[in-house]
Amino acid sequence: MLRSLFAWFVLPFVLVALPAQQDLEARLDAVKEFSRYFKKSKEEALMVEAVMTLKGNECRPAAEELFKLLKHPSAVVQQAALTVIETYTLPSTYEPWLAELPKSKDNEFLALVLKVVGRAKLKSAVDAIEAVGNDAKTSSVVKFEVARALQAIGEPPKTGMLGNLLTDREPQVRIAALDALAALKVKTLGKAVTGLLDDPEWQVQTAAISAAGVLRPQEAVQPMIDLMRKNGRLQLECAEALFRITGLDFGVDPDRWQKQWNNLMSLGGWRIPTDEDLVKGAEARKKNDAFYAASSQVTTFAKIKTTSTNVLFIIDVSGSMDDLVIEVEKFQGYRDRKRFTIVQTELLNAIDSLTDNTNFDILAFATDIHTWKKRLVPANVVNKDAAKSYVRGLQPIGGSESQQLAAAGLGGSANLEAGKTNTLKALLYAFGVDPDKPPKAVLTGFDKNAIKSPLDTVYFLSDGRPSVGKLIETNEILKEVRKHNEVYRMVIHAIAIGDFTKEFLQQLANENGGEFVDLGR
């Protein structure tokens, strides 16, 4: 009787354990077959396809195979491995690596593990991450990944470790720490964030402004009013952050801000409004602030305002830009209804509006890219005149006339191949990257050249259909831009024209701190 009772209790557990064991055996078999196939694979596409077979086969051996591939020479294989391993979320999968984290002196290993557990949002890794960040001997690259991992996981450390990273000698680490503090809403470090508003690097300043707008420390108000008196993109960002902190709105007019702030401080006992008060203020805020428009330092291109003094205009000259717009009523006053004529006119007007303290350049792109200059130049009377001559001389490559030649069998004269849309190459030019000559593939760390770039604002104008280049899938292009802009901190505005789905350009602007304008179909 006892034996039968024992069997009755044990049998369900056996039945449960058996499928689990069989499932593990299936996963281990999948890893074995992957390893066999990958070793003989030569083509990049087949390697990526093989890597993707490990998705849904989480186990420690699979994670180990994927981890090795994070150092693969091919960037796409690296990315595929990261895409799969970030779906592995069981603490037991990462247990050996987490145990090794605080003890390891291998910076490459540390950075890769931090990248992986961050992307996997592994909350059980926070203590180990914090131990690495608190180690005085930790390299700047590893500290950068520490901050990014905590931000991705969404869990603040128990100590003031992120505050310590704000004083790191590498500006990229300071940026990563500021981003993490803002994302994690660590309001106790608002005063430390305020101290970076006068950082020597503008990229750190813009990260500090953004963080202050989220954490809302009262100490940041006066430094941001002072910062607003300097020319450049940060004026608009200070105005927005000041509104988020105080609930007041005086645009980019530092004198009005100062007068009101002095009045408030003279009252005594004034405190910044609550988050609830701020929500009410935001609802009542006028969309088009009169003070922005009144500032002599504001440049407008396609109705997008900027106080930036370092601007790149990117204009699409692909064949599709030769097409006619459909919404005729929206485009009165232009010499014709071609998409290109309209954007060309907008660009000429923008050049006219540039102030003499602005530096700018122009890039035209189709299948390839062509720059007016190789660097930013002052917007003086001579350069503005030369720039307008350059823009007037631009025309769509492989437009309607070329298409007619091709239809008549004169393909050699049509130049249609040169008139495609290489969106990726045009966008990456802003980061000093040629996708056809990529640097060595590295998943971790940061681009040290980012801080050296004076360029802070891009206007990207296109009909938005990538058709040629290293990447033409829009989500992949967005991912590549995000990767490079992580520390470059460029604002990318997107202006769309034509009859097509505009979500790509809208997302491009949204993800990179810019505005999106739909000129019309």
Image (cartoon, rainbow, N blue to C red):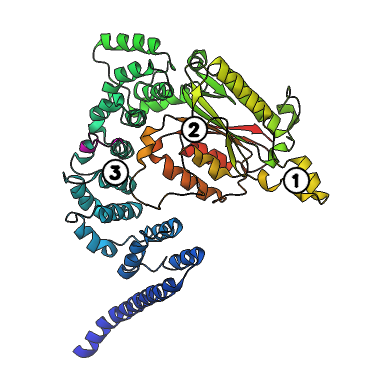
Q: Is residue 143 magenta?
A: no
The dot on residue 514 is 2
Q: Which residue is mark 1?
A: 414
Q: Residues within 10 Å of mark 1 (few under 14, many from 20)?
A: many
Q: Is residue 239 above or below residue 319?
A: above
Question: What kind of residue is marked 1?
Answer: Ala
Earlier in the chain: of badge 2 and badge 3, it is 3
The residue under the point 19% across, 88% down is 2
Discs 2/3, front = 3
Please name the predominant secondary structure of the magenta segment in the image. Answer: loop
Q: Residues within 10 Å of mark 2 (few under 14, many from 20)?
A: many
Q: Nearer the viewer, residue 203 or 237?
A: 203
Earlier in the chain: of badge 1 and badge 3, it is 3
For the magenta stretch, what is the residue range?
164-171
Q: Is residue 344 above or below residue 434?
A: above
Q: Which residue is mark 3?
A: 144
Where, by quadrant of the figure, is residue 56 drawn? bottom left
Specify whether residue 381 is in view: yes
Question: What kind of residue is marked 2?
Answer: Gly
